Image (cartoon, rainbow, N blue to C red):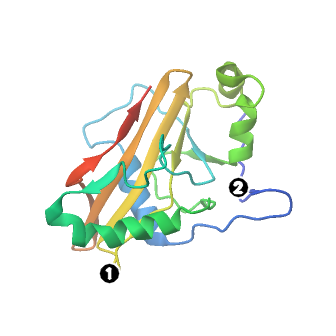
């Protein structure tokens, strides 16, 4: 049995989160989450996506610890970083606008958090009972853009168990109408568990 939960989000009692509607953002998400052309998973999976956006899990109060452009790119990337920070000041809710070539479930953050609230990492057993063969869940931030929408920045992560997962920032450039991931010029962070 498959459960699909759509359009259900809470920021607290009676407060609804804003929806991510920008189609450019969904085009960026598709580039980050599509498998490489030569990647062939052993078994097709239904991807579970946390519906609420989330930022990179920062360990300090230093806002730029993981997004430091080198000196040559500071002027170009600072407005992009600022837009990313503004877009992620509070969570938003993703919509069923992904153009993935695979099935996915968009699950409210409260549902995912509920598996771990009282059991901590022990909640993974219940998660996998509810979402078998999912391989865990993915989460992503809102997308930040530069002023002409030729650069995009987002965080994307994957959690699959107590010590299973990872996440990083992704920088993309739009050329000839197509988004492509490029290397971050400077210092950035990645987490792996």
Compare marks 1 and 2 and give the one earlier in the sequence: 2
Q: Quadrant for the C terminus, please.
A: top left
Nearer to the camera, 119 or 137: 119
Residue drawn 36% across the image and 39% down it:
190
Asked if residue 139 shows in the view, the reply is yes
Which residue is identified by label 2? Answer: 6
Q: Is there CB contact under 8 Å for labels 1 and 2?
A: no
The answer for how far apart the CA atoms under marks 1 and 2 are is 31 Å
Query: How many labels sit on residues?
Result: 2
Residue drawn 50% across the image and 55% down it:
141
Residue sitting at the far front: 61
Look at the picture and state if 156 lies above or below 92: above
The residue carrying pointer 1 sits among few (fewer than 14), some (14 to 19) or many (20 or more) residues within 10 Å by Cα, namely few
Which residue is identified by label 1? Answer: 148
Residue drawn 53% across the image and 45% down it:
139
* Element on which disc 1 rests: loop
Nearer to the camera, 12 or 138: 12
* Element on which disc 2 rests: loop
Look at the picture and state if 118 lies above or below 151: above
Q: Where is residue 150? Give x, y as percent.
A: 29, 73
Question: Comparing marks 1 and 2, which lies closer to the viewer?
Answer: 1
**Relative to residue 185, is residue 150 drawn left or right?**
right
Residue drawn 54% across the image and 45% down it:
103
Where residue 97 sits, quadrant-wise, is bottom right
**Relative to residue 145, is residue 117 drawn left or right?**
right
């Amino acid at each position: 049995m498959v459960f699909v939960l759509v359009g259900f989000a809470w920021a607290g009692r009676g407060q609804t989160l804003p929806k991510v509607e920008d189609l450019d953002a969904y085009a960026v998400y598709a580039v980050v989450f599509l498998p490489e052309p030569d990647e062939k998973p052993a078994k097709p999976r239904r991807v579970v996506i946390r519906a609420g956006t989330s930022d990179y899990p920062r360990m300090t109060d230093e806002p730029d610890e993981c997004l430091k452009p080198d000196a040559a790119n500071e002027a170009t990337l600072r407005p992009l970083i600022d837009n990313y920070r503004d877009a992620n000041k509070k969570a938003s809710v993703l919509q069923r606008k992904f153009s993935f070539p695979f099935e996915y479930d968009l699950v409210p953050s409260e549902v995912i958090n509920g598996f771990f609230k009282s059991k901590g990492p022990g909640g993974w057993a219940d998660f996998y009972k509810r979402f078998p063969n999912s391989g865990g869940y993915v989460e992503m931030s809102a997308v930040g853009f530069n002023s002409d929408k030729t650069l995009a920045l987002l965080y994307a992560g994957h959690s699959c168990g107590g010590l299973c997962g990872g996440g990083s920032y992704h920088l993309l450039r739009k050329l000839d109408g197509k988004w492509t991931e490029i290397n971050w010029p400077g210092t950035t962070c990645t987490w792996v568990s």
